[in-house]
Image (tube, rainbow, N blue to C red):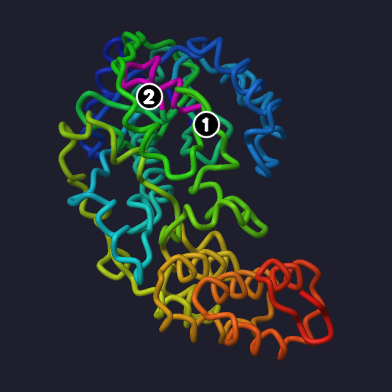
Amino acid sequence: MLRGSGFLTPEAAKDYLFALAREEGFDAMGIASADAIPHAGPRLHQWIAEGAHGDMDWMPATAERRAAPARMWPDVASILLLGLNYGPDEDPRAILDERARGAISVYARGDDYHELIKGKLKRIASRFVPRAGALGAVEVKVFVDTAPLMEKPLAEAAGLGWQGKHTNLVSRDKGSWLFLGAIATNLALPPDAREIDHCGSCRACLDACPTGAFPAPYRIDARRCISYLTIELKGAIPRELRPLIGNRIYGCDDCLAACPWNKFAAMGREARLAARDENRAPALAELARLDDAAFRARFSKSPVKRIGHARFLRNVLVAIGNSGEPRLAAEAERLLGGADPLVRGAAVWALARLLEPPALARLAQAQGHETDREVREEWRQAGVAIAGERP
């Protein structure tokens, strides 16, 4: 939190904030009043009651604070919502046909956007507060999407876009490719007009989802979403969903990339948002060989690092199993000896997809030392007997 004291009028304060935001490279901006999203809380509670949040326990734990900005900060009056375009320079779905390579979501191909945006927000705040004190004792707080603030409905209220049928923000100027940040203040600033829904009868995003994660327009079941399955889910990915994941090893862009409004979104102009070349189409074999230290080094500034080495290998192995490339079986076989049962179980599944039954049975017979219940169940589901057991 920052405090300061010297300005003019609320309108002038808003103009100054917008000027600072443009200097920091933000592509969209708007003001929402703190009470602009009265329906967001009840909708969130209903979503959680349906269990659609999966095992993201932090969602129900923070639901009360998320329900309204004032529950998180009682003195908040206005919120500046900012959008940064990260539109890709190519269709991110093209790599889905390269089955021996891994698909990483566009937002995670470069440096972690949380740090990038937080730095920009802090610089805006540090310049704004000293100028704003004539309007009273001004305070501000900055937020990226790790805080319990509902940025998407607030961004809709601030006029940046609308929540599309895929539940993400859609902009008429930037399509579905906007990172969001927020600066909350106790200063009452003139709010902008709410954006209206422009989806119409289009359902391109819903039809593009490989796993059917949208039970209805504007509703998402995280338990079927590939972004949730590859990032948030801590355990094994449900067997029935694994074949649908294809080679997506971190997140999924299908619903975003399918949005027709993307035709108005140019590639993000911020150089630091550019994808690293090694993350555009990495070979699955190369990724499977990364040990923990190599994984951390390779993804040192990337959001990918946050899921940890074991979950990363789980995702890579599911992609290997979906590759249809028997030559990749050697990578999965090597990981049968991994220390983490999550990795070993995923390796069994991959091998069952790539090997002929006799070769798989020979491997199973060498696994009598396996003690983990879930890994042994993977062998049973594969239809072969572990040493000392019947299939």
Picture quarter with the C terminus: bottom right
Q: CA distance from mark 2 to mark 1?
A: 11 Å
- In the displayed structure, 73 sits above or below 389; it is above
Classify mark 2: helix, strand or loop: loop
Q: Residue at x 43, y 58 (%)?
A: 246
Classify mark 1: helix, strand or loop: loop
Residue 296 in the magenta stretch? The answer is no
Of marks 2 and 1, which one's residue comes earlier in the chain?
2
- Residue 90, given in percent of the width and then of the height, sits at 19, 51
Question: Label 1 near label 2: C-beta < 8 Å?
Answer: no
Q: Nearer the viewer, residue 303 or 132?
A: 303
Residue 154 in the magenta stretch? The answer is yes
| Horizontal side of residue 330 vs 359, given as left or right | left
Q: Nearer the viewer, residue 172 or 151?
A: 172
- Residue 42, given in percent of the width and then of the height, sits at 63, 15
- In the displayed structure, 298 sits above or below 86; it is below
**Quarter of the rendering containing residue 100:** bottom left
**Quarter of the rendering containing residue 156:** top left
Q: Report the magenta residues as a range.
A: 150-165
The disc at residue 220 is 1
Q: Residue at x 58, y 16 (%)?
A: 75
The residue that disc 2 covers is 164
- Badge 1 crowding class, 10 Å Cα cut-off, few under 14, some 14 to 19, many 20 or more, is many
Q: Residue at x 41, y 63 (%)?
A: 301
- Residue 186, given in percent of the width and then of the height, sits at 50, 17
Q: Residue at x 32, y 13 (%)?
A: 195
The disc at residue 234 is none
**Three-letter residue code for mark 1:** Ile
**Three-letter residue code for mark 2:** Gly
- Residue 79, given in percent of the width and then of the height, sits at 44, 21
